[in-house]
């Protein structure tokens, strides 16, 4: 009898140790999930701030385009040289179209920045509801529906993959922003030199190269923005699946408190999914605006190069005060492109942090289900 009692005690102790180990594993996974979601919220905030800075820089860039257009129009009106006046009129016309495209892009960037901020707010609310749901499930010692848990894990994995794709696209945007900054700086220097040393051959060559580099950067930027728009659409679709999985878990949960927590998490996930869908729509609008910009800038680049050469030829006979205004306007655009480059650098860092947090989130969901 004593042996039997002893065996029962040993088995009970072993069962308690296993239960304790399971509890510790669940708690560790839940803590990992809380940290991952806190990191996601922080990264979202940084991304929203960088998006706002980028939107402001694009507004400044649009204003600089208007200033450049006005300077070309002013120099054309002077009509000190017929060839130069014709070339400047063509540049002014092309830049007029570009200014409208730039304004549309600035507006699209502003909308995207707002959508990033809204997504950050909804993500923070979902993080709190998700953490509460995990805590309630642990307190109830309940196990979520296996299919709902598997669906949730798969949806979060899809989110992570979409965030990785968005981070890759943002890295490509960062490269194009750096290229635009370098080309704008070179163009501003060349235009300034042409204003003080008209006809300088090296400056003309620099204008030709810089305008070509800017046109290419505009094209590459549009490609990267299209990739970002696709990744944001994929992310939004995954967010819908997260909400659906939580709703299924709530319906299957036997414990009333855990079920109520799952339902709140499902509602928060649905709100986050709507914000993600709005962000995807804004990202698509930005990509479309960038495509229009790129198309117009090809015409601007060709016209600006023709104006530079016509101006250099005319400079042997006279000077034009509007050339100084043109140089100053190009400098303003260079400053705006520098601000865009900085905002994109910041965006890349935030997006990389978010991608890492998403990966940790997916691992935590898996570990909770496996514990």
Image (cartoon, rainbow, N blue to C red):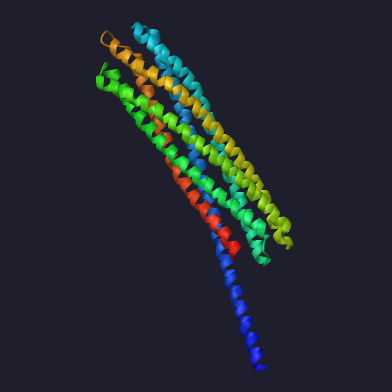
Which residue is most to the bottom? 1
Tell which of 146 and 205 is nearer to you: 146
| Residue 317 located left or right of residue 347 | left
Residue 108, position in %: x, y? 54, 31
The quadrant of the image that shows the C terminus is bottom right
Tell which of 328 and 123 is nearer to you: 123
| Residue 80 located left or right of residue 69 | left
Residue 110, position in %: x, y? 53, 33
| Whether residue 27 is visible | yes
Residue 318, position in %: x, y? 28, 9
Q: Quadrant of residue 61?
A: top left
Tell which of 143 and 328 is nearer to you: 143
Residue 163, position in %: x, y? 52, 46
Number of disc labels: 0
| Whether residue 111 is visible | no
Picture layout, residue 14 above or below residue 23: below
| Residue 94 located left or right of residue 268 | left
- In the image, what residue occupies the spot 26% across and 16% down? 199
The quadrant of the image that shows the N terminus is bottom right
- In the image, what residue occupies the spot 49% across and 52% down? 356
């Amino acid at each position: 009898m004593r042996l039997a009692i002893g065996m029962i005690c040993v088995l009970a102790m072993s069962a308690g140790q296993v239960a304790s180990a399971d509890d510790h594993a669940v708690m560790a996974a839940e803590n990992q999930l809380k940290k991952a979601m806190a990191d996601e919220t922080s990264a979202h905030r940084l991304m929203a701030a960088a998006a706002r800075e980028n939107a402001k820089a694009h507004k400044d860039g649009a204003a600089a385009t208007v200033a450049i257009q006005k300077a070309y129009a002013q120099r054309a009106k002077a009509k000190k040289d017929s060839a130069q006046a014709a070339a400047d009129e063509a540049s002014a016309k092309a830049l007029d179209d570009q200014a409208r495209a730039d304004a549309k892009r600035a507006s699209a960037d502003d909308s995207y920045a707002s959508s990033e901020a809204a997504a950050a707010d909804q993500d923070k609310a979902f993080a709190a509801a998700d953490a509460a749901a995990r805590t309630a499930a642990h307190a109830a010692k309940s196990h979520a529906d296996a299919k709902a848990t598997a669906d949730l894990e798969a949806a979060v994995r899809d989110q992570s993959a979409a965030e990785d794709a968005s981070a890759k696209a943002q890295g490509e945007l960062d490269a194009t922003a750096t290229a635009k900054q370098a080309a704008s700086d070179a163009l501003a220097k060349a235009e300034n030199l042409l204003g003080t040393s008209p006809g300088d051959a090296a400056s003309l060559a620099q204008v030709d190269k810089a305008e070509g580099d800017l046109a290419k950067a505009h094209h590459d930027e549009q490609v990267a923005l299209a990739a970002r728009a696709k990744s944001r659409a994929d992310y939004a679709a995954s967010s819908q699946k997260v909400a659906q999985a939580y709703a299924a878990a709530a319906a299957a949960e036997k414990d009333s408190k855990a079920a109520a927590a799952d339902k709140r998490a499902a509602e928060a996930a649905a709100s986050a999914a709507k914000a993600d869908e709005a962000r995807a729509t804004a990202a698509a609008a930005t990509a479309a605006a960038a495509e229009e910009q790129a198309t117009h800038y090809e015409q601007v680049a060709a016209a600006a190069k023709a104006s530079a050469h016509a101006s250099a030829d005319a400079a042997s006979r006279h000077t034009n005060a509007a050339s100084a205004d043109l140089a100053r306007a190009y400098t303003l655009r260079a400053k705006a492109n520098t601000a865009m480059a900085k905002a994109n650098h910041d965006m890349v860092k935030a997006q990389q942090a978010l991608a890492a947090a998403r990966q940790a989130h997916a691992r935590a969901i898996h570990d909770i289900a496996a514990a």
